[in-house]
Each structure stands twice: as structure tokens, then as C-alpha cells.
Image (tube, rainbow, N blue to C red):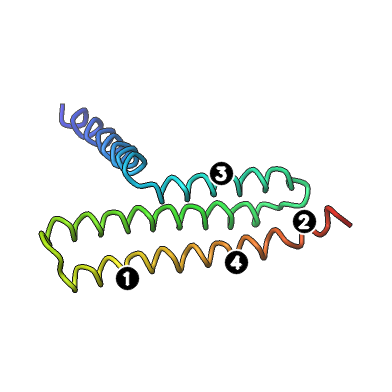
Amino acid sequence: MDKKKTKWAWFKKFGYAFRGLFTSLKEETSLVVHIIIGVIVLVVAALLHKQMNPIDWAIIVLVIGIVIGMELLNTTIENLVDIVAFEYNYNAKKIKDISAAATLILTITAIVVGLIIFIPKIIMVFN
């Protein structure tokens, strides 16, 4: 009986995680934008499949996952700050701005990594 409860508790955790993802998708347009861009990048990579190697794929998927994960963390931090700070608070604003900056830095990094991977491959296709 104990093992069965543990097994179902483990599955429930996935349910909670998916519920959190769906809630974020409904409420956070920036998350939706990041996911759409991630899908576009994966489509471009698929179109360049002859030039792509497993390391390129791993880097692309990893960077997309990091950006989406950071966007989820940013959303979490913003919601937590909203719960704690009921009215305008300069420090609460700083926390939210810094969290958004972390997402921005990772997004810029992802763009640079994508350009480093894709530009030589696109040049190869057109040569």
C-alpha cells in the first residue's frame, strides 16, 4: 500500500508541474513569445538538418530550455513579490526588474548562441 501511494504521489507532482506550465501559458504573454520563438528556431534547425550535428541540436535545445525555464522563474518571482508587497515598494520593483534582467541576459545569450550556430550553416546553404 505504501509503494502505491508513493507511486501516485510521484505522478501528482507531474500534474502540478503541468498545471503550473498551463497557468503560466495562460497568464504570461512573454512565455508564449519565448515558446513560439523556440519552435521557430527548431523549425529552422530542422530545415538545416544536413548541416546540423548532434552537438548543435543539444546546444539549441538546451539554450531554449534555459530561456523558458528562466522566464518561468521570473514569473514566479514577480508573483511572489506581488503577494508580499501589497502596494508600490521600491525594493519590490528592484527585485522584479532584476529578475526580468536575468531573463533578458539569457535571451540575448541565446540569440548570440543561435547566430553562432546558424550563420555559418546558412552561408553554406547559399554557397
Query: What SS does tag 4 mark?
Result: helix
Q: Position of residue 25 (x, y in %)?
A: 36, 41
> Which amino acid lies under the numbered mark 1 shown in the image of this protein?
Ile
- Looking at the image, tell me whether mark 2 or mark 3 is earlier in sequence order: 3
Residue drawn at the location 45% of the way across and 57% of the way down:
67
* Residue wearing tag 3: 39
Report the disc number at residue 122. Answer: 2
Question: Between residues 25 and 17, which one lies in front from this camera angle?
Answer: 25
* Residue wearing tag 1: 98
Q: Position of residue 15 (x, y in %)?
A: 29, 34
How many angstroms separate mark 4 from mark 1 (CA)? 21 Å
On screen, residue 40 above or below 9:
below
Q: Would you identify the image quadrant in which residue 9 lies?
A: top left
How many angstroms separate mark 2 from mark 1 (CA)? 35 Å
How many angstroms separate mark 4 from mark 2 (CA)? 15 Å
Classify residue 72 as left or right of residue 41: left
- Looking at the image, tell me whether mark 3 or mark 4 is earlier in sequence order: 3
Residue drawn at the location 54% of the way across and 48% of the way down:
38
- Looking at the image, tell me whether mark 2 or mark 1 is earlier in sequence order: 1
On screen, residue 87 above or below 61:
below
* Residue wearing tag 4: 112
On screen, residue 71 above or below 25:
below
Question: Between residues 121 and 100, which one lies in front from this camera angle?
Answer: 100
> Which amino acid lies under the numbered mark 3 shown in the image of this protein?
Val
Which residue is situated farthest in the front direction here? 88
Q: Would you identify the image quadrant in which residue 76 lies?
A: bottom left
Classify residue 61 as left or right of residue 16: right
How many angstroms separate mark 3 from mark 1 (CA)? 27 Å
On screen, residue 102 above or below 38:
below
Say few, some or many: other residues with alpha carbon within 10 Å of mark 3 (under 14 / 14 to 19 / 20 or more).
few
Report the disc number at residue 57. Answer: none
Cβ–Cβ under 8 Å for marks 4 and 2: no
